[in-house]
Image (cartoon, rainbow, N blue to C red):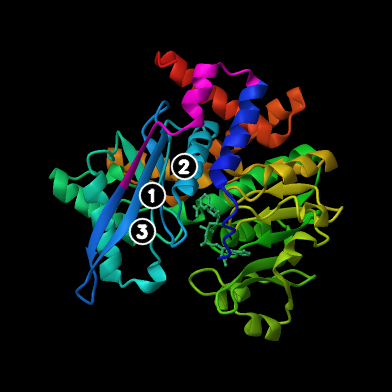
């Protein structure tokens, strides 16, 4: 994936928070408390590699806030991981859980490593080492990790096993994103993509647009994107362009088909990292275009669902004048500079920590099911998810309409107010 070393997500997260603190008129003490993580852990994980040498990996856990409940957030394995990325993501988790109105705070973790170059045994050792460092500070009532970029249900199960071995008991609510049958929840795989489309459905209703008359362009073709496309197609919409990262050529590529992409056909030519094969796509009649072409298509809806920092001051003007809605499946895809342009152009934005809250909401359901040791049917999970996401969407859009706020600002006002109230009610500030 392309990484822009000059982009600092924590600075962006703080700028967004400062703006909302000004809007609310937040007192200085609460502002200072929420501008920085409540606590952070930086540690070394020694691992005996397959060749017999010992390699030391750098690990992090940032707990931004646990005012509304145990910290919650994924653990990312990435070679370019930085503590500022983890801090930003932890802060966004706080707002996400608050806007979804689930009783959890915000956290995030990471390890600087590249799973592409690690055997399964080495990855297991990193997972177990991470828990050895953090076991005193994570747990069902302290901080509940989950998968993120390049970590998966197997990693979560290794972490749980290490935790339970150290603690000497069974604590399935200590971590989420586990395999179904080993404490995982049905519906978790679909949850983020579906959640984004539940929000989109509500937005289109409010805007008076029939979903069946709409077309969309999507950035990314991984977990979030594929399930978002699946549900949007079932609702009658048509995706005409999808982009993904081409690992061989180290660049992004857009795949364009004006009469609509075929989801199953594209899935059949996609690798497990969400990279589409350009040669096979060309054979199937897709036009192969530069990576950024997804952004300037003549569509009603844009769904950035890849990585952060994708709609920026440098490219926002390329957005076609037909575009009415941007649904942020990814975390942090739009910079504050681009936000200002979207707002000016009247493009309706469904901001990241609202649009992609379906994943953590379902993780919360997973924890609830684990704690009561009773597992729900898939339809039960998805119906509960729809109800939560729909309520979250309306709490934000009602405020945006009544106070004439940009949707991101309204989402921040809702979330920051809830977290600030918890800090105040606890007597912290
Ligand atoms: P994924 O790894 O399954 O897929 C990522 C996709 O993005 C891949 O298709 C990859 O090829 C593509 N991509 C990467 N860089 C790109 C670029 N420069 N241009 C175009 N495409 C590019 O990841 P995911 O789980 O679908 O997550 C996507 C985003 O959603 C991330 O920002 C993630 O933090 C966020 N998110 C995910 C979840 C979840 O439950 N999976 C929950 C909340 C937020």
The answer to if 242 sits in the magenta stretch is: no
Determine whether, in the image, residue 201 is placed left or right of residue 169: right
Q: Which residue is mark 3?
A: 153
Query: What residue sits 34% from the left and 52% below the top?
Result: 59
Please identify, in this view, whether the residue under mark 1 or under mark 2 is nearer the observer.
2
Quarter holding the C terminus is top left
Disc 3 residue lies near ligand 1 with CB under 8 A: no
Location of residue 228 (image quadrant): bottom right
- Which disc, if any, is residue 146? 1
Determine whether, in the image, residue 141 is placed left or right of residue 419: left
State the SS at label 2. helix
Spatial CA span between label 3 and label 2: 23 Å
Q: Earlier in the sequence, mark 3 or mark 2?
A: 2
Q: Which residues are magenta?
A: 24-42
Spatial CA span between label 1 and label 2: 16 Å
Residue 221 seen: yes
Indicate which quadrant contains ligand 1: bottom right
State the SS at label 3. helix
Neighbourhood count class around disc 1 (C-alpha, 10 Å): few under 14, some 14–19, many 20 upward = many
The answer to if 37 sits in the magenta stretch is: yes
- Which disc, if any, is residue 87? 2
Coordinates of residue 47 in the picture (x, y in percent): 23, 63
Coordinates of residue 81 in the picture (x, y in percent): 45, 55
State the SS at label 1. strand
């Amino acid at each position: 994936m392309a990484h822009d070393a000059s982009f600092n997500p924590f600075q962006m997260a703080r700028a967004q928070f400062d703006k909302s603190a000004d809007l609310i008129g937040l007192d200085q003490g609460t502002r200072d408390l929420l501008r920085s993580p409540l606590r952070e852990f930086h540690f070394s994980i020694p691992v005996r590699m397959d060749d017999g040498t010992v390699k030391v990996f750098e690990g992090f856990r940032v707990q931004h806030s646990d005012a509304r409940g145990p910290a919650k957030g994924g653990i990312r394995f990435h070679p370019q991981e930085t503590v500022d990325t983890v801090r930003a993501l932890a802060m966004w988790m706080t707002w996400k859980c608050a806007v979804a109105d689930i009783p959890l705070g915000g956290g995030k973790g990471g390890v600087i490593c590249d799973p592409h170059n690690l055997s399964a045994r080495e990855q297991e050792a990193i997972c177990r080492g991470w828990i050895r460092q953090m076991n005193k500070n994570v747990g069902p009532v302290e901080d509940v990790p989950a998968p993120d970029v390049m970590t998966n249900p197997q990693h979560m199960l290794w972490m749980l096993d290490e935790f339970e071995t150290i603690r000497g008991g069974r604590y399935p609510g200590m971590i989420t994103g586990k395999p179904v049958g080993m404490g995982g929840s049905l519906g978790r795989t679909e949850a983020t993509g579906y959640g984004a489309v539940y929000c989109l459905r509500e937005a289109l209703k409010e805007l008076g647009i029939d979903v069946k008359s709409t077309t969309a362009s999507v950035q990314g073709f991984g977990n979030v994107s594929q399930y978002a496309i699946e549900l949007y197609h079932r609702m009658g919409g048509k995706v005409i362009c999808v982009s993904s990262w081409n690992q061989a050529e180290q660049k992004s590529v857009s795949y364009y088909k004006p009469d609509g992409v075929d989801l199953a056909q594209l899935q059949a030519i996609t690798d497990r990292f969400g990279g589409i094969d350009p040669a096979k796509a060309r054979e199937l009649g897709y036009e192969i275009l530069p990576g950024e072409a997804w952004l300037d298509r003549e569509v009603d809806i844009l769904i950035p669902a890849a990585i952060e920092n994708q709609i920026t001051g440098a490219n926002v003007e390329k957005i076609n004048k037909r575009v009415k809605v941007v649904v942020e499946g990814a975390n942090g895809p739009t910079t504050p500079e681009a936000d200002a342009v979207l707002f000016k152009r009247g493009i309706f934005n469904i901001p990241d920590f609202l649009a992609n809250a379906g994943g953590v909401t379902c993780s919360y359901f997973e924890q609830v099911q684990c704690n009561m040791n009773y597992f729900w049917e898939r339809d039960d999970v998805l119906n509960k998810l729809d109800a939560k996401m729909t309520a979250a969407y309306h709490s934000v859009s009602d405020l945006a309409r009544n106070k004439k706020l940009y949707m991101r600002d309204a989402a921040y006002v809702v979330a920051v107010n809830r977290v600030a109230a918890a800090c105040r009610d606890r007597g912290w500030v």
